[in-house]
Amino acid sequence: MKLYIKGLIMGLALAGTACTDLDTDINTQYTEFPDSEIARRGAYNGCYYYIRNEAWVGRNFWEGILTQGDEITCVCYTESYYFDSGRFFKGSAHLLDPDCQGIGLLGDLMAGITYTNSQIVIYGGETLKDPNVATLRAIRAFYHFWMMELYGDAPIMDHSLEEGEYYDRQPRAKVAEFVEQELLEILEQNALPENNDLSTYGTPTRWMAEALLAKLYLNWGVYTNDINTVDNNTPNPKLDDCIKWCNDLMASGLFEVGQGYRKKFFPDNGVQIKDFIYAVPMDPATLGANYSGGAEFYRWVTFHNTGLIAPQIVGDYVLTGGVIGNFVMTKEAVARFCLEGDERNDMVLAENVCQFDPKTFEKTTTPVILYKDARHRKKVGQLSFTVDVNYENPSILSVGDESDYNNTIQGARLVKYPPREEDYKSWGRKQANDIPVFRFADILLTKAECILRGGNDPMGQTAEELINQVRDCSSAPHVDKTKEGLNPAQGLSQMDQILLDERSRELIYEMWRRNDLIRFGQFEADWMGKSNTGLDDKATWRRLCPIPRGEMERNTNWSQNYGY
């Protein structure tokens, strides 16, 4: 097999001898792939950073996946504004269907695997398991994990297809076993990088593989049992294994929750954040995705009275900084940010909104002021978002026409990834905030949960001790059973509720809430009036997303998930 690569990449040209012939034909072809470390690194980066487009930080994820949890919900302003054929509200209402754009993530994941497989073929030798491709196998396992997590049965794409061959979907439990074996095998090879510095930032390391394995084991009961019967009491035989890998991450000494929560998500975050085990680096100048997960969600973020956006007129009112936006916090999520002295509370914009400093992103005591005319002459008062949302048309989560100011202020806003003013203005709402995938704080909470579920910890730690380590970062008080978790949801103990609430406070807007709610048996609970949309709250088959219609048409041997 010969590989033809048209064009000449600057990095590859400089990797070998110096260039002396400036008249090289632009159609020059390589008959073999360049054998150099720079060429290899460039090819591998394409596999790692595939998730920067849609598979992690893109529109499909936050429309179709993040909104399924009980933290962020959509509001529409009449059927013509922020409805967009239902693409926004259907995730929030648990009414996804095969035509929803948000569930198109499956195609993105499969494309990422296909590209990664092409590089494994080039660099993996005859067995395709050469230690040189350990990082590629790790990212491929990550993509398989998310196919299984979202869609249940999924193709095991462990090789490139031959002519006439096709992938069939495999049982979810079998995919889980494939991900497990891939990770265990590459960890045993000791071929993954073990440093945590600029040279490995944003790429798979040993620690990324261990964190993924911990996530897999934490949800093992979900993945290997009938999805319709899973609840908080579903047995999990992998608890001790999960604790083992959590302890290995802790023993590495490379990670810590640190002191100061909000700064981890500022635009200047990066390799210096020792809470990040694996993150997606974001650069607004080169980012291919439409959004980095910040500015579009937070287009209502107001740092100062001039606003990040030109003053926006809504009816007769000027809303400085632009308070319109179709994603708001659920009132249930807002209620969780209640711990005294907890820095995480500052992310919630509700009643009496104050400005943020545009350079430090610290909250000030200066009110955000509304004006009734475009020239800022008629002051209305301080901006206040309501915690409750009153749907004028619950069937599409519409709060009414956006020309009515009282509709636009419904719902608290979350500001976790504040944009730099220059990025917002120069790069069309693309941001510099790196997006965490696996965090050390999550590992501590994962271990705490395994202990609560009966796992054995050789270190003898308690769940409360681990939760308190996480809280210390944001100066939140330690667990107090006299005040917390006193009215647990059905099927949960007091400590279960405390842990589930803590996971929300710590990991909100990090894509894990849907995963958590299913494991705790709370995915069908009602929040933010979800039941008013006509959804059958007992439709447990909605724990799996529908297979996108386009994928069904391309893979005619597949069967659609039940219910869709």
Image: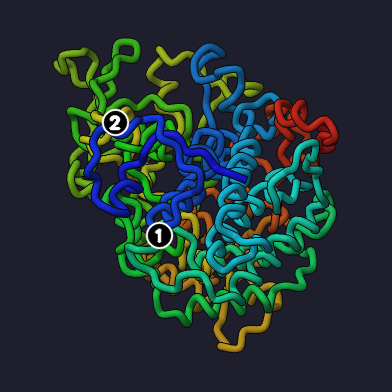
Q: Secondary structure at mark 1?
A: helix
Residue at the spot 79% in from the left edge and 63% down from the top edge? 234
Q: Is residue 279 left or right of residue 452?
A: left
Measured from the top left, where is residue 423 in percent x and y? 26, 36
In the picture, the disc for residue 200 is: none
Measured from the top left, where is residue 387 in percent x and y? 46, 37
Q: Distance between the Cα atoms at labels 1 and 2?
A: 32 Å
Measured from the top left, where is residue 131 in percent x and y? 56, 69
In the picture, the disc for residue 427 is: 2
Quadrant for residue 68, please give it.
Answer: top right
Residue underneath mark 1: 37
Residue at the spot 37% in from the left edge and 60% down from the top edge? 342
Measured from the top left, where is residue 124 in percent x and y? 60, 60
Q: Nearer the viewer, residue 329 or 519?
A: 519
Answer few, some or many: residues within 10 Å of disc 2's Cα (few below 14, many 20 plus, some between 14 and 19).
Answer: some
Amino acid type of the residue tagged 1 in the rendering: Glu
